[in-house]
Each structure stands twice: as C-alpha cells, then as structure tokens.
C-alpha cells in the first residue's frame, strides 16, 4: 500500500472529540507522509477524494463519514482500486459499523492499523439509485407522523431562524444510529408506528407479500460470499411469528412509501427499491492476523 496518505478529518469528529483527532493525526504523521484535509462541507469532502492522486485515503470520523467516502468513491467508479482506511472517532453507537468491519476501537490502535494493517475486501449492496450499504439495511414500520429526523433525511427544507437550523444540523450529525428492534415499532419522531405492508423478493422469489404486515426487514451483505442475508419479521398474531430468512444476490422491496436506514443514513420514502450484492467491491484496512489482539487492547486514546 502507498505510504502517502490523504487524511480527511470529518468536521463532526473535530467538534466531538478533538483530543482523539489530535492523537490520530500524531500517530499517522509519525509513520507516513501525510496530507491533511479539513473539509467543512460534503462538497469539500468529495473534492478532496477526487484530487487525492496516488495518496491512500484515510477517514477520521464516524460511520457517516465512512459511508460518505465509500459512496463518493463508488460514484467516481474508483472504489474497486482504492483501499480505504478509517480511524473511528465518535460515540460507540456512531462508530459501530467501523468496529463491526474489524477496525479497532482505540484511536491509537486504529491509526496503527492504517500504517501496518492489511487490506480486506468486503461485499457491498448497491441500490438502483446508486446508493450503497456497507453493514446493514433496515426497514422499520411505517411512521404515523413525520418527525424532524425523517424530514431531514428526506431532504425537506427545515424551518425556523438560521441558528435553529444550525443546531438541528449539528444534532443530526451527532445523533447516534438507533437500530430497529424486532417487535417494537418506532416512528422517526419517537412514537409508535403502524406495521409495514411490503413485498420482499430475493432473486425473484417472493419471501413475503403485501397481504402479511411486517415489523421489520433486515438485509446484510457478506454473510455468504456474493450473497446478502435477508430477515423479515412478520407481525405476531396470537403466537409469536417466526422470522423468515433467505439469501441471494438481489433483493427487491415494494410497498407504499416506505423509509429505510442504510448503515447510518435514513432514506426514502420510496415505493420500490432493489439492492444488488457486488462481491468484494470495496476494501478496508484492518489489523494483520496476530496483531488484532494487541490492537484491540487499545480501546481508549492511549497506547495499545
């Protein structure tokens, strides 16, 4: 791997944990030739990736920043030939995806993995609007009322004075990713929500149809090479309903204006969306075998 690094420090990371950012920067600059980039907007973030040249990109930030980098490289059609590194910075819930991919929890350990680790290829879910899913796709029940979080995710214009809009933007950036729990219907605004009626097809075969309401749908790439694991939890009527499971390369969901959460990003509403698995489509740097135990001991900011 190239020893020239483009270190992109996400603005949310700079606001939430400046000490972790400083430590990551110190470790990386001590072990490689580093060009630092401090973008203040998604446009600057994307521009830095486009102009990286032969430098290896390193994202210092949370799961949203990681997904943003993978999405940008995918849309530039440069993802397959680029090994991406990440130093997770943020609350535990906001960096759960990176840790699940094998990136160490400690700042020092993660930065050392950037310098001394190995590249591990991962499957990717790509939808028909060119969106990507790295870790998990979740479809919650239909919301009865639209909350602020859903409005922001759908791209609606926020109202109120500029300082209110700024606070809302910061809160959205710092918000933890809340998983959808089976059996608990939660609307974006925090209240109860009605069950969804969805048709879920896996490789053209119907797993559940519109006549049977569901509590949640989860799609995860990489459970089996080149396939996605699909789980549908139907609404219980009397006795508890067992989840329906399948695996395949293409998953199509059809329903009335449903929203979904792709990793740390909420999207929709849509009435139909198809996700296709791309085997080994992207790569992330993780500790080498035998170093993982030592790296995992650095759960804090201190030496691993």
Image (cartoon, helix red, strand yellow):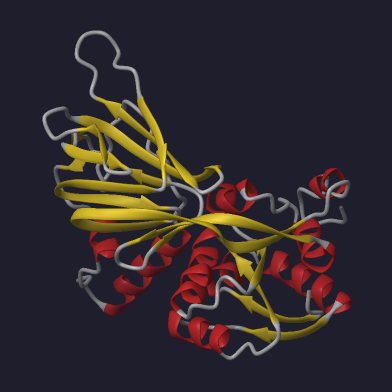
Residue drawn at the location 50% of the way across and 64% of the way down: 67
Tell me if residue 211 comes above or below residue 33 in the rendering. above
Residue 115 falls left or right of residue 165? right
Residue 222 falls left or right of residue 276? right
Front-most of residues 139 and 13: 139
Decide if residue 40 is in sight here.
no
Residue 87 falls left or right of residue 198? right
Q: Residue 85 falls in which quadrant of the image?
A: bottom right
Q: Quadrant of the N terminus?
A: bottom right
Tell me if residue 120 comes above or below residue 226 in the rendering. below
Image position, residue 53 (x, y; %) = 65, 90
Image position, residue 203 (x, y; %) = 33, 44
Question: How many numbered discs?
Answer: 0
Residue most extreme to the top: 239
Front-most of residues 183 and 211: 211
Residue most extreme to the front: 204
Residue drawn at the location 48% of the way across and 72% of the way down: 74
Front-most of residues 227 and 2: 227
Decide if residue 257 is in sight here.
yes
Image position, residue 215 (x, y; %) = 26, 31
Tell me if residue 47 comes above or below residue 133 in the rendering. below
Image position, residue 136 (x, y; %) = 45, 47
Q: Residue 162 falls in which quadrant of the image?
A: bottom left
């Amino acid at each position: 791997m190239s020893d020239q690094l483009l270190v992109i420090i996400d603005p949310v990371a700079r606001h939430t944990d400046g000490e972790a950012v400083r430590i990551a920067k110190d470790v990386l600059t001590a072990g490689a030739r580093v060009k630092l980039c401090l973008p203040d907007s998604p446009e600057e973030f994307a521009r830095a990736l486009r102009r990286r040249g032969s430098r290896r990109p390193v994202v210092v930030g949370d799961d949203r920043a990681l997904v943003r980098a993978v999405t940008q490289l995918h849309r530039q059609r440069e993802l397959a030939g680029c090994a991406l590194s990440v130093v997770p910075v943020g609350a535990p819930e906001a960096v759960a995806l990176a840790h699940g991919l094998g990136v160490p929890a400690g700042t020092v350990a993660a930065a050392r993995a950037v310098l001394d680790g190995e590249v591990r290829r991962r499957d990717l879910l790509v939808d028909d609007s060119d969106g990507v899913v790295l870790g998990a796709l979740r479809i919650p029940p239909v919301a009865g009322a639209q909350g602020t979080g859903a409005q922001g995710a759908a791209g609606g214009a926020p109202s109120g004075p500029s300082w209110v809009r700024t606070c809302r933007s910061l809160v959205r950036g710092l918000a933890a990713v809340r998983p959808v729990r089976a059996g608990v219907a939660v609307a974006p605004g925090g209240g109860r929500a009605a069950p969804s009626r969805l048709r879920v097809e896996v490789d053209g075969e119907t797993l559940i149809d519109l006549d049977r309401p569901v509590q949640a749908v989860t799609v995860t790439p990489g459970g089996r090479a080149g396939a996605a694991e699909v789980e549908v939890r139907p609404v219980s009527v009397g006795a508890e309903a067992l989840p329906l499971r399948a695996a395949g390369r293409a998953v199509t969901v059809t329903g009335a204006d449903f929203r979904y959460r792709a990793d740390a990003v909420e999207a929709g509403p849509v009435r139909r969306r198809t996700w296709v698995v791309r085997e080994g489509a992207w790569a992330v740097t993780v500790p080498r075998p035998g170093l993982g135990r030592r790296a995992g001991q650095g759960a804090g900011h201190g030496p691993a």
